[in-house]
Image (tube, grey):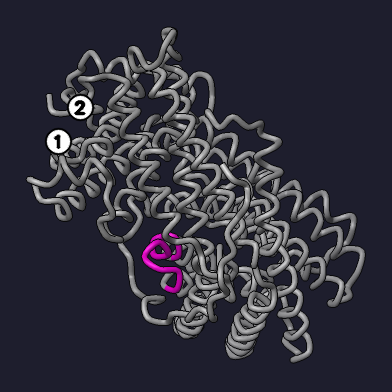
């Protein structure tokens, strides 16, 4: 395969969309879990401090409490490790902020440190793929801590309070596992089944029954809707296997979930022979506390499942060391980290120049904008401005109630905590409507303030952070996004060719003097590697497609690579058992 890469012409500036940025989506299927978790994780420490008459320390307890927002999609074995890392990362950030605040009162230095911390938060959360709410919570807490009056002798006590709240947040995040220990894996499997059913429906809409065998098996071009459905289903199945891998032990329910994921993979390989209603029924039965559906086992499906289990026991079949994956992940994040550092610093300094008393609000606003590409950053900026402006109006309405006393203040904050997490999955701006008054009320834990001044400062800082932050994103281009597509294409092609060679080697009489061929584990490892490469190619292409001043992307080559890759994936399923597809209909 030639290593030369084709040159692509430079395309004009991409349009930044406005329509759709404020459109509401379906709520997350677990929206209530982070919403309830944060209320419990924040409420117990805050009410304790209220009873002790030390509500002024709530900032430090919230540093640990807000860690309960993370890792709700992870199986509990992996969640425990992830939450522990989140708490330790939060404590490290707060420690840097508190020590800096105790050593200097220079706002210029504090803004610079806050911008560097924000860039580090962006890089680390993206690299580890910790998921929502991403870096913004770390940046919000560390930036507020930078501007909190502090002495060096107070730092250990404040960190101890944050650590205690973090331990409580860890317990809150892990507690549901006592009641529903396989909940995350069940949800991941249900998503895979629903996505596979969606692909089957899209396939049936494109290929009439008489043409399925002739055109569908060749994977002919079939339109963007069909391709998106197939990519989404492949990603959901891959995510389900990753969830099952992270779960650790394999009790009976876990093995039943593995069988269901196999059925989803069979649906991708043979959509014409799959009943989407059956997939959706299995997915629906995975909700709640119903027993895990147990499809009728078939001999070849059992063989396929046994190979999957062999791979799960051996670990991810990426063929790369963890060190290499981390090293490879740093390069693409450097432009985003630089955008974050520059945008946050400039936003803070402009806020200082305008005489706003809380420049960290502008810094946090800028930090919240930065997404995988410029188009998404623009949309997040629109959402942030709209949400914050509506939020300050909501704060003005509830301020008289919150000012009735410290208890009312705490209860209002808890209500907004719940509302933010309940609404933010519908659209970021809707969640920001609750985040904004919550942040304003938190600033009053040390004493009630005049609402008009808080509202003015917040509006100015929101506009400054959004405008300056977006300008910094435009200034720091990410021209290497196209190169990463080329790298991802090369990875897919190598993985596809490797899988194709194994398929050919396993055919009886595939060549003179051919041996017994590779074992099923080798083919399955190749299949998982190809599936992961296809998911990464789609994510890389989507991210690069939203960059500004980007050269024309090899969209046709991507489409052909995805079609060939998915045909090879389907061939591996068929090759692993001639009756696997029949078993899906049993």
| Residue 271 found in image quarter | top left
Q: Main secondary structure of the magenta part?
A: helix
Quick one: which residue is furthest to the right in this view?
A: 103
What residue is pinned by disc 2?
Answer: 581
The N terminus - image quarter? top right
Callout 1 secondary element:
helix
**Which contiguous range is marked in magenta?**
420-429
The C terminus - image quarter? top left
x%, y% of residue 317?
Answer: 53, 28
User: Which residue is depicted at the point 27% across and 50% down?
Assistant: 220
Above or below, 417 relative to 295: below
What residue is pinned by disc 1?
Answer: 273
Report whether 458 appears left or right of 496: right
Q: Is residue 137 visible?
A: yes
Query: 579 or 377, which is in the foreground?
Result: 579
The crowding category of the residue bearing disc 2, from other C-alpha atoms within 10 Å (few below 14, some 14 to 19, many at least 20), is: many
Tags 1 and 2 in contact by the CB under 8 Å rule? yes
Query: 92 or 526, which is in the foreground?
Result: 526
Report whether 398 appears left or right of 169: left
Above or below, 115 relative to 459: above
User: Which residue is depicted at the point 40% across and 29% down?
Assistant: 181
Residue 428 is one of the magenta-drawn residues = yes
Query: 403 or 330, which is in the foreground?
Result: 330
Sequence-earlier tag: 1 or 2: 1
Above or below, 123 relative to 507: below
Query: 335 or 14, which is in the foreground?
Result: 14
Callout 2 secondary element:
helix
């Amino acid at each position: 395969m030639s290593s030369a890469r084709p040159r692509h012409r430079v395309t004009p500036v991409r349009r930044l969309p406005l329509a759709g940025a404020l459109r509401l989506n379906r709520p997350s299927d677990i929206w209530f879990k982070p919403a309830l978790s944060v209320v419990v994780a924040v409420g117990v420490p805050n009410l304790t401090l209220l009873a002790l008459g030390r509500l002024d320390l709530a900032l430090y307890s919230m540093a640990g409490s807000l860690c309960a927002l993370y890792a709700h999609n992870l199986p509990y074995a992996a969640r425990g490790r992830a939450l522990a890392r989140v708490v330790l990362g939060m404590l490290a950030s707060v420690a840097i902020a508190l020590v800096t605040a105790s050593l200097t009162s220079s706002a210029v230095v504090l803004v610079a440190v806050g911008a560097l911390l924000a860039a580090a938060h962006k890089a680390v959360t993206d690299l580890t793929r910790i998921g929502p709410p991403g870096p913004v919570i770390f940046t919000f807490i560390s930036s507020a801590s930078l501007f909190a009056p502090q002495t060096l002798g107070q730092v250990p006590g404040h960190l101890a309070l944050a650590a205690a709240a973090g331990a409580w947040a860890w317990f809150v995040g892990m507690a549901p596992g006592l009641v529903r220990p396989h909940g995350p894996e069940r949800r991941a499997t249900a998503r895979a089944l629903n996505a596979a059913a969606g692909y089957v429906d899209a396939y049936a809409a494109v290929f009439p029954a008489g043409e399925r065998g002739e055109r569908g098996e060749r994977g002919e071009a079939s339109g963007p809707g069909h391709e998106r459905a197939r990519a989404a289903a492949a990603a959901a199945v891959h995510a389900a296997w990753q969830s099952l891998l992270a779960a650790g032990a394999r009790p009976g329910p876990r093995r039943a979930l593995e069988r269901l994921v196999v059925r989803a993979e069979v649906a991708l390989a043979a959509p014409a022979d799959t009943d989407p209603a059956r997939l959706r029924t299995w997915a629906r039965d995975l909700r709640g506390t119903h027993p895990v559906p147990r499809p009728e086992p078939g001999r070849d499906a059992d063989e396929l499942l046994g190979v999957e289990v062999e791979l799960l026991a051996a670990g991810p079949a990426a063929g790369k060391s963890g060190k290499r994956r981390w090293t490879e992940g740093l390069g693409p994040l450097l432009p985003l980290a630089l955008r974050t550092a520059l945008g946050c610093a400039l936003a803070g300094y402009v806020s200082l120049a305008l005489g706003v008393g809380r420049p960290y609000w502008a810094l946090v606003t800028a930090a919240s904008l930065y997404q995988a590409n410029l188009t998404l950053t623009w949309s997040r900026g629109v959402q942030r401005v709209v949400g914050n402006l509506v939020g300050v109006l909501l704060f003005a309405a509830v301020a008289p109630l919150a000012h009735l006393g410290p208890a009312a203040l705490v209860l209002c904050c808890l209500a907004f905590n719940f509302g933010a997490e309940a609404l933010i999955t519908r659209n970021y701006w809707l969640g920001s409507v609750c985040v904004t008054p919550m942040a304003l009320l938190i600033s009053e834990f040390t004493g009630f303030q005049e609402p008009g001044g808080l509202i003015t400062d917040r509006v100015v800082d929101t506009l400054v952070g959004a405008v300056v932050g977006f300008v910094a994103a435009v200034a720091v281009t990410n021209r290497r996004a196209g190169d990463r597509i080329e790298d991802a294409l090369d990875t897919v092609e190598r993985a596809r060719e490797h899988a194709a060679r194994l398929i050919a080697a396993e055919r009886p009489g595939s060549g003179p003097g051919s041996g017994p061929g590779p074992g099923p584990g080798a083919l399955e490892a190749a299949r998982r590697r190809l599936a992961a490469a296809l998911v990464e190619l789609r994510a890389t292409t989507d991210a690069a497609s939203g960059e500004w001043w980007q050269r024309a992307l090899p969209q046709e080559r991507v489409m052909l690579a995805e079609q060939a890759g998915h045909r090879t994936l389907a061939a591996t399923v068929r090759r692993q058992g001639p009756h696997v597809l029949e078993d899906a209909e049993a």
